Amino acid sequence: MRHGVARFVTGFLALPVGLYLFYVVWPFLQAAGYSLTDWGGYSDRQQFVGLDNYLRLFSDELIRKAFWHNVFFLITVPFFTIALALFLAFLLNVGGREDKAGIRGVFGSGLYKVIFFFPQVLSLVVVAVMWQQIYRADGQGLINGVLMKLGLVSPDEPITFMYDPEPFLGVPAVLWWLLLIAVWSGAGFYMVLFSAAMQSIPKDVFEAAILDGAGRFHTFFRITLPLLRDTVSVAWVYLGFIALDMYALVFVMTPSQGGPNHASEIFASVLNFTAFQKGQFGYACAMGVALAIFTILLAALQLRITRRERIEY
Amino acid sequence: MSTVTHTPGGPAGTDQAPPPTRTPAQRAAVGGGRAGARFFNGFSHLFLAVWAIMVVYPLLWVVMSALKTDSEVIRKPLSLVPERLQWDNFARAWTEGHIGSFFFNTVLVLVGSVFLTMLLGSMAAYVLARYEFRGNRLIYYMFLSGLTLPIYLAAVPLFKGVYNTGVVLPFLGPNKHLMLILVYVAWSLAFTVFFMHSFFRTLPTAIAEAGMVDGASHSRLFFSVMLPMAKPGLISIGIFNVLGQWNQWYLPTLLMQSVAGEPKNQVISQGLIELSVNQGYRSDWSGLFAGVTMAMLPVLIVYIVFQRQVQSGLTAGVTK
């Protein structure tokens, strides 16, 4: 009998674990190994250089720029997405009039929930190609076209969106435009997530608050938000990963994949450029390892900060 | 739009004077003060409507542009109503734009990889969730770690492996689609194992024990009792995998680089990117819009049909 169990366990695990080791774990280990060499990628010549690649990271101007852009997305993408999603979820679930059936969302909230989720199911590629057209820097672009019709933008000076490296609030404008796409496509998912969490809060909690004379503003900040703490922090972690992974957007949307003039460069774009254009695989692997360490540290930190006693209800 | 949380004159200002007695009518005006409630109500409708337009309008615009002539796209880019519906844009994109081949490749890879992911993922998750053995935790954490690792780190070795295909798996030979399937499966295993693991844990043990008493073998028990019981979980994770892999862009672009420029081998996301990046050279705007429309339709349909499962699955997987 015991023997049978062992054979069964091994048999069931062999294939998945094998595939995983081969295509996920092994490449990672290899990358870590390459990061200690000066391997160019297209030839067999590689020399052990120790931590040289890592030291080089610290003095690399481009990497420093990319790092701060990553940090920018890391802060703004979760913040704006969560704020918007929370607000939408609040309106859709408890924002409506209270009637005999108790607290509820505004009229038509079922339909809104379906619609708001749309961008989430669209492939990032479709989203990117679509926003390319929306952001076109001439009268044919959706935004420029509308604004020109309204007379808010002169046809001679359209908004240049992806070609605008000028800083806005200290960050290149192009990054803000990329941020808008990320928030646009992510808010629906988190709206659904927060909706589910809000639905699980007992209605009496809200009713009691209202009886005590709490307004919507207070209901939201004093009751809803604290009770959603867990969900919000999970969302924050997820969005953190998404924010680190803005590469597809940068690749499709920006001129020369990180332009203009490196204004939208992020870790992943520098990594890919270094590996596949400049042929410095060893150095690129060091960037990858640094990114992985950064990600793991961040996730750990995030979990530490947000871990607090749960509110029981 | 940024004033939303303050709502001057709205609920915030009204709660300083709580009603002395609370009648149903007063309760109905949530947040006190009927005017405040009405203001808030109007405001929330406005806000929701504006966001709905921001979501729907671009989608509609793409679909409608796909039905215009090329010159109309340039002349009247903003209109939502095409002068005459140009259905042959779709036919042209399908053949000349190679969307047809993209579809075929994507579906081929998708069917294989999702089936394998689900099968292998639930097998591993079941064993890890239900059996105690040495190394159990280790293997589970190994899968879990895949959730946080950025794929870019593996890019170089994976690419190198494909560059000399022989090194990766000799018997695969030059079959890049099969390779893509295996890589997808490996990378989707992390989330699938994670998700199904928690699902199998919630299933009652009594039935499994009854099966054991009846003399069913371990694998028989899995395939004819546990797997059918896990159907709701399987549906959710299946939808996630379909959506996720349909949307994959980085992996195919990385692994199929050598076939770039040879559209008949590309998957849809890859092909679309190339079409759009190449817009500078040829300018078939309506064809591009038709391609984008065709790429988003299947996903939208899957979503609308399985909407309930997607939404409940989402929350089941993410929260507890």
Image (tube, rainbow, N blue to C red):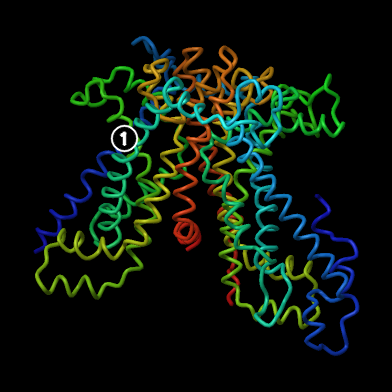
In the image, what residue type sits under mark 1?
Leu
Left or right, A219 with reference to A234: right
Residue A182 falls in which quadrant of the image? top right
The residue lying at 70 percent from left, 70 percent from top is A223
Residue A112 falls in which quadrant of the image? bottom right
Left or right, A245 with reference to B15: left
Question: In this figure, which residue is indicated by the disc labeled 1?
Answer: B108
Q: Is residue A32 visible?
A: no
Q: Nearer the viewer, residue A36 or B100?
A: B100
Q: Nearer the viewer, residue B275 or B74?
A: B74
In percent of width and height, residue B291 lies at: 50, 29
The residue lying at 24 percent from left, 55 percent from top is B134
Toward the front, the furthest residue is B84
Left or right, A68 with reference to B198: right
Is B68 situated above or below B243?
above
Is A196 situated above or below A301?
below
